[in-house]
């Protein structure tokens, strides 16, 4: 869709939306400050304010780390289902011909027979208990998109990114995902690095700049009802990732685990279909991405401190 000149992105001030804007600055980016997408009235107003759109990229959502996901399951389900339902339905009513929505590999089952799992496995079991409601809210978005394609013939599709990390992520304690939490704790630790769980779970970490480069390709080429898995080849344990970060910044810390909330053991997805669309795409190795992210975080904290001191 290289010729599109009117693409709207929800979640425009979020982690992915902010980075995507650097790659596609001419697209329209809206956030929760502009519209409350859980309200059908405001969702309808959004499409009245931006008529004749060529496409919508739906990135908005209520997200959090493993602890927040586990403790606020009702809120996560309610708000995400409302938001997703309103955006897809109002886009359809407004005559938007193309919509690309972000799901999550959290929508896939906690356990499958074979790994890495494939797109066809999405309904083969319940999501992990720690992501139960969030995972089901994403499944409902997929069901809605698949249904609208079948009944109304619209070119709506979705993709499932693995764990995304990078500069601009959420670094608030208790609400951040694993990599920003790891970076925050590493920067604050002097002798011992204390982490949740056992260090054994495996994760595919997707650098935010990579997914932002892939999204425009999917907008053009991903025109099916398949919940396309977007993930790199690397599948690393939590302990591997912690040691990779420490080695990359040359910091010697003793890593200890609290044995609590390990979360889903495996959630690695097969990226074969993705590669058939994006070709010879070079994913950022975790060692490079986590180093860049750590350096960005340290630089940001330094700027904050200098700003306070200067004031």
Image (tube, helix red, strand yellow):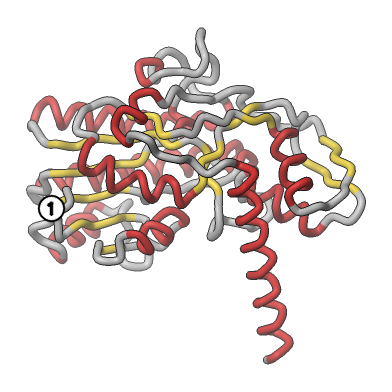
Going 75% across and 38% down the picture, which residue do you hit? 196
**Near-viewer residue (273 or 8):** 273
- Quadrant where the C terminus is found in the figure: bottom right
Left or right position of 41 against 29: left
Residue 257 seen anywhere in this rendered image of the structure: yes
Asked which quadrant contains residue 236, the reply is top right
**Where's residue 309, x and y in %?**
73, 87
Residue 45 drawn above or below residue 185: below
Residue 21 drawn above or below residue 207: below
Residue 152 drawn above or below residue 26: above
State the SS at label 1.
Answer: loop
Left or right position of 134 against 256: left
**Where's residue 9, x and y in %?**
29, 56
Going 63% across and 27% down the picture, which residue do you hit? 202
Asked which quadrant contains residue 304, the reply is bottom right
Left or right position of 9 against 193: left
Going 29% across and 35% down the picture, which residue do you hit? 158
Going 25% across and 62% down the picture, which residue do you hit? 27
**Near-viewer residue (173 or 3):** 3
Mark 1 highlights which residue?
54
Asked which quadrant contains residue 270, the reply is top left
Residue 32 seen anywhere in this rendered image of the structure: no
**Where's residue 255, x and y in %?**
85, 40
Q: Which residue lies furthest to the front in this view?
A: 280
């Amino acid at each position: 869709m290289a010729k599109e000149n009117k693409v709207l992105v929800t979640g425009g001030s979020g982690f992915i939306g902010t980075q995507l804007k650097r790659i596609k600055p001419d697209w329209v980016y809206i956030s929760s400050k502009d519209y409350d997408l859980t309200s059908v009235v405001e969702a309808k107003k959004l499409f009245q304010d931006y008529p004749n759109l060529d496409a919508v990229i739906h990135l908005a959502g209520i997200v959090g780390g493993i602890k927040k996901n586990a403790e606020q399951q009702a809120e996560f389900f309610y708000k995400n289902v409302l938001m997703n339902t309103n955006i897809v339905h109002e886009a359809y009513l407004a005559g938007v011909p193309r919509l690309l929505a972000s799901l999550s590999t959290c929508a896939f089952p906690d356990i499958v027979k074979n790994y890495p799992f494939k797109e066809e496995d999405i309904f083969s079991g319940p999501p992990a208990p720690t992501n139960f409601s969030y995972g089901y809210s994403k499944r409902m978005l997929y069901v809605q998109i698949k249904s609208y394609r079948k009944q109304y013939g619209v070119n709506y599709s979705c993709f499932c990114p693995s764990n995304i990390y990078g500069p601009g992520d959420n670094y608030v304690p208790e609400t951040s995902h694993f990599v920003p939490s790891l970076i925050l704790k590493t920067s604050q630790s002097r002798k011992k690095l204390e982490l949740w769980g056992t260090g054994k779970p495996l994760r595919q970490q997707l650098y935010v700049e990579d997914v932002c480069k892939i999204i425009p390709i999917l907008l053009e080429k991903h025109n099916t009802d398949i919940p396309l898995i977007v993930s790199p080849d690397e599948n690393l344990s939590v302990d591997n990732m912690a040691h990779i970060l420490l080695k990359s910044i040359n910091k010697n810390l003793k890593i200890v685990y609290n044995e609590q909330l390990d979360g889903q053991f495996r959630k690695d997805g097969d990226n074969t279909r993705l590669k058939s669309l994006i070709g010879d795409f070079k994913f950022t190795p975790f060692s490079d991405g986590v180093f860049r992210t750590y350096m960005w975080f340290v630089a940001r904290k330094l700027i904050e401190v200098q700003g306070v001191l200067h004031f």
